Image (cartoon, rainbow, N blue to C red):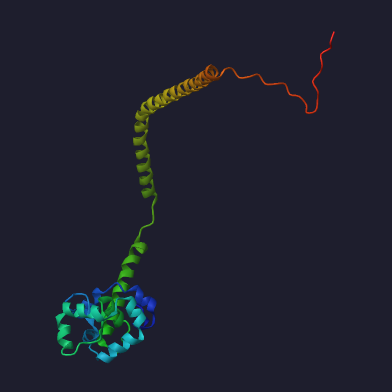
Amino acid sequence: MPPEAVLLESRAMRDSVMGRVDVLDKVKALVLLPDGLHVTTRMVADYFEVGVEAAKSIVKRHRIELQGNGMHTLCGSDLQVFERSNLDLSKESYPQGRAQLTVHTRRTVLNIAMLLRDSEVARAVRTYLLDVEEGARGRDEVPRQTRPAPTVESLDHRLTHVESSLADIGPALRDLGPVIGRISGRLDRLDRRLDATNRVVCAMSERLSDLAEDVRELRYGPRPLPRPHRHPGSRPKRRDQG
């Protein structure tokens, strides 16, 4: 098992176990606000059995990391709505309301457990985390280590199974042969019909073109024959007078 200090020093290691928030209640019951989601900084200090200033110091030094795991600060209307939903806070703030309030989620509390050095509760959480992580890795590695190597008998059995499956496929393919043949014949007949239809359409198009020419001649008369081309500047030949 890696030493407990690895969680104190390595953020990557902390991130790798951040999903195991169930560890908190296994070490000590975590009391939440009435919304069932958050705790205040004072409640965090009570859980870890340290002073409020020690908890605030962790929040100040690791604010960005803790914000990434759910810690946020409420103020203004958000704080008023939150306090109305969590009556205990309003009692604490009476008679003068607070300007802002920092609240934490279970992930934040677990994050603080991996940063707080001078707390026996935090140390127990870190030890439990490492034990659980080590056990999970051990369960993953055992199957790979104990998996038996394939034997000649097992390979022969697999080969027999494959051959049996291929034998079942053969009759099915033979039954499909006539069906495929009939479908192929129908497709050939459709191709021939389409070809004949295309020839008919072409013939009708030519006939319509001829009819259009006939109608034009009936309406405007036959087209004049083209005049013979004469080179510019040439003179027409005179007929001999005899």
Image coords of residue 130 (percent x, y): 31, 77
Residue at x-position 33% and y-position 78%: 67
Relative vertical location of residue 101 with respect to residue 177 in this rendering, above or below: below
Asked whether the viewer can see residue 127, the reply is no
Q: Nearer the viewer, residue 122 or 203?
A: 203
222 to the left or right of 142: right
Image coords of residue 127 (percent x, y): 29, 80
Q: Nearer the viewer, residue 78 or 161?
A: 78
Among the 4 quarters of the image, the one containing residue 126? bottom left
* View extreme (top): residue: 242
Q: Nearer the viewer, residue 108 or 139?
A: 108
217 to the left or right of 72: right
* View extreme (front): residue: 241
Q: Quadrant of the N terminus?
A: bottom left
Image coords of residue 187 (percent x, y): 42, 26
Q: Quadrant of the C terminus?
A: top right
Asked whether the viewer can see residue 176, the reply is yes
> How many numbered marks, from 0 up?
0
Residue at x-position 36% and y-position 64%: 145
Residue at x-position 37% and y-position 76%: 13
